[in-house]
Amino acid sequence: MQISRYDLITLSFFIWSQKKEVMDNPRRRYIGFINTTNQLLKDCFLYELYPVNPYECFLLMSLLADAPLSTYADVWEMAYKDVNG
């Protein structure tokens, strides 16, 4: 199975959401995620992050929350519940 661009972005999000050294600094976490993810995507001959894309924007906004992974999971759960009742 081939790894997609979204797989790489999501994995990078997970890594940055768990970094202890930026846990108390959402701005540093956000900037670090953008820089390292863009470099990763370039290295794989893929386009950089595109904040207009709803999923990529969602990840970026989640990184600015106090608990990025919890925010991600909560929003994802609410979206799933709305679709499935």
Image (cartoon, grey):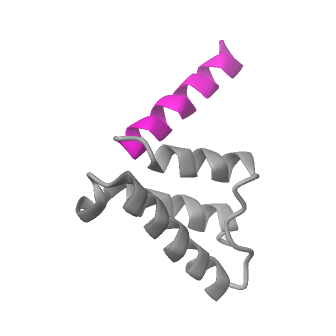
User: Extreme top residue here?
Assistant: 85
Residue 62 falls left or right of residue 85: left
Q: Is residue 81 above or below residue 4?
A: above
* Labels in figure, total: 0
Seen in the image, is 50 located left or right of residue 22?
Answer: right
- Give 11 or 49, whichever is nearer the viewer: 49
Range drawn in magenta: 67-85
Residue 74 position within the rendered picture, expressed as x and y whole percent measured from the top left: 47, 30
Please state the horizontal and vertical placement of residue 64, each as a whole percent of the image: 45, 47
Residue at the spot x=31%, y=55% of the render?
25
Q: Main secondary structure of the magenta part?
A: helix
Q: Residue at x 72, y 61 (%)?
A: 50
* Front one among 81 and 40: 40
Q: Is 76 inside the magenta-drawn segment? A: yes
- Seen at 38% across and 52% down, the residue is 26
Q: Nearer the viewer, residue 75 or 61?
A: 61
Q: Position of residue 39 (x, y in %)?
A: 57, 81
Above or below residue 85? Residue 17 is below
Residue for point 41% across, 45% down: 68
The quarter in which the N terminus is drawn is bottom right
Estimate the x, y position of residue 45 in percent, counting from the top left. Answer: 72, 85
Instruction: Specify whether 5 is left or right of 76.
Output: right
Q: Examine the rendered structure and indicate whether residue 8 appears above or below residue 60.
A: below
Residue 34 falls inside the magenta stretch: no
- The part of the image, by quadrant, that contains residue 67 is top left
Image quarter in which the C terminus is found: top right
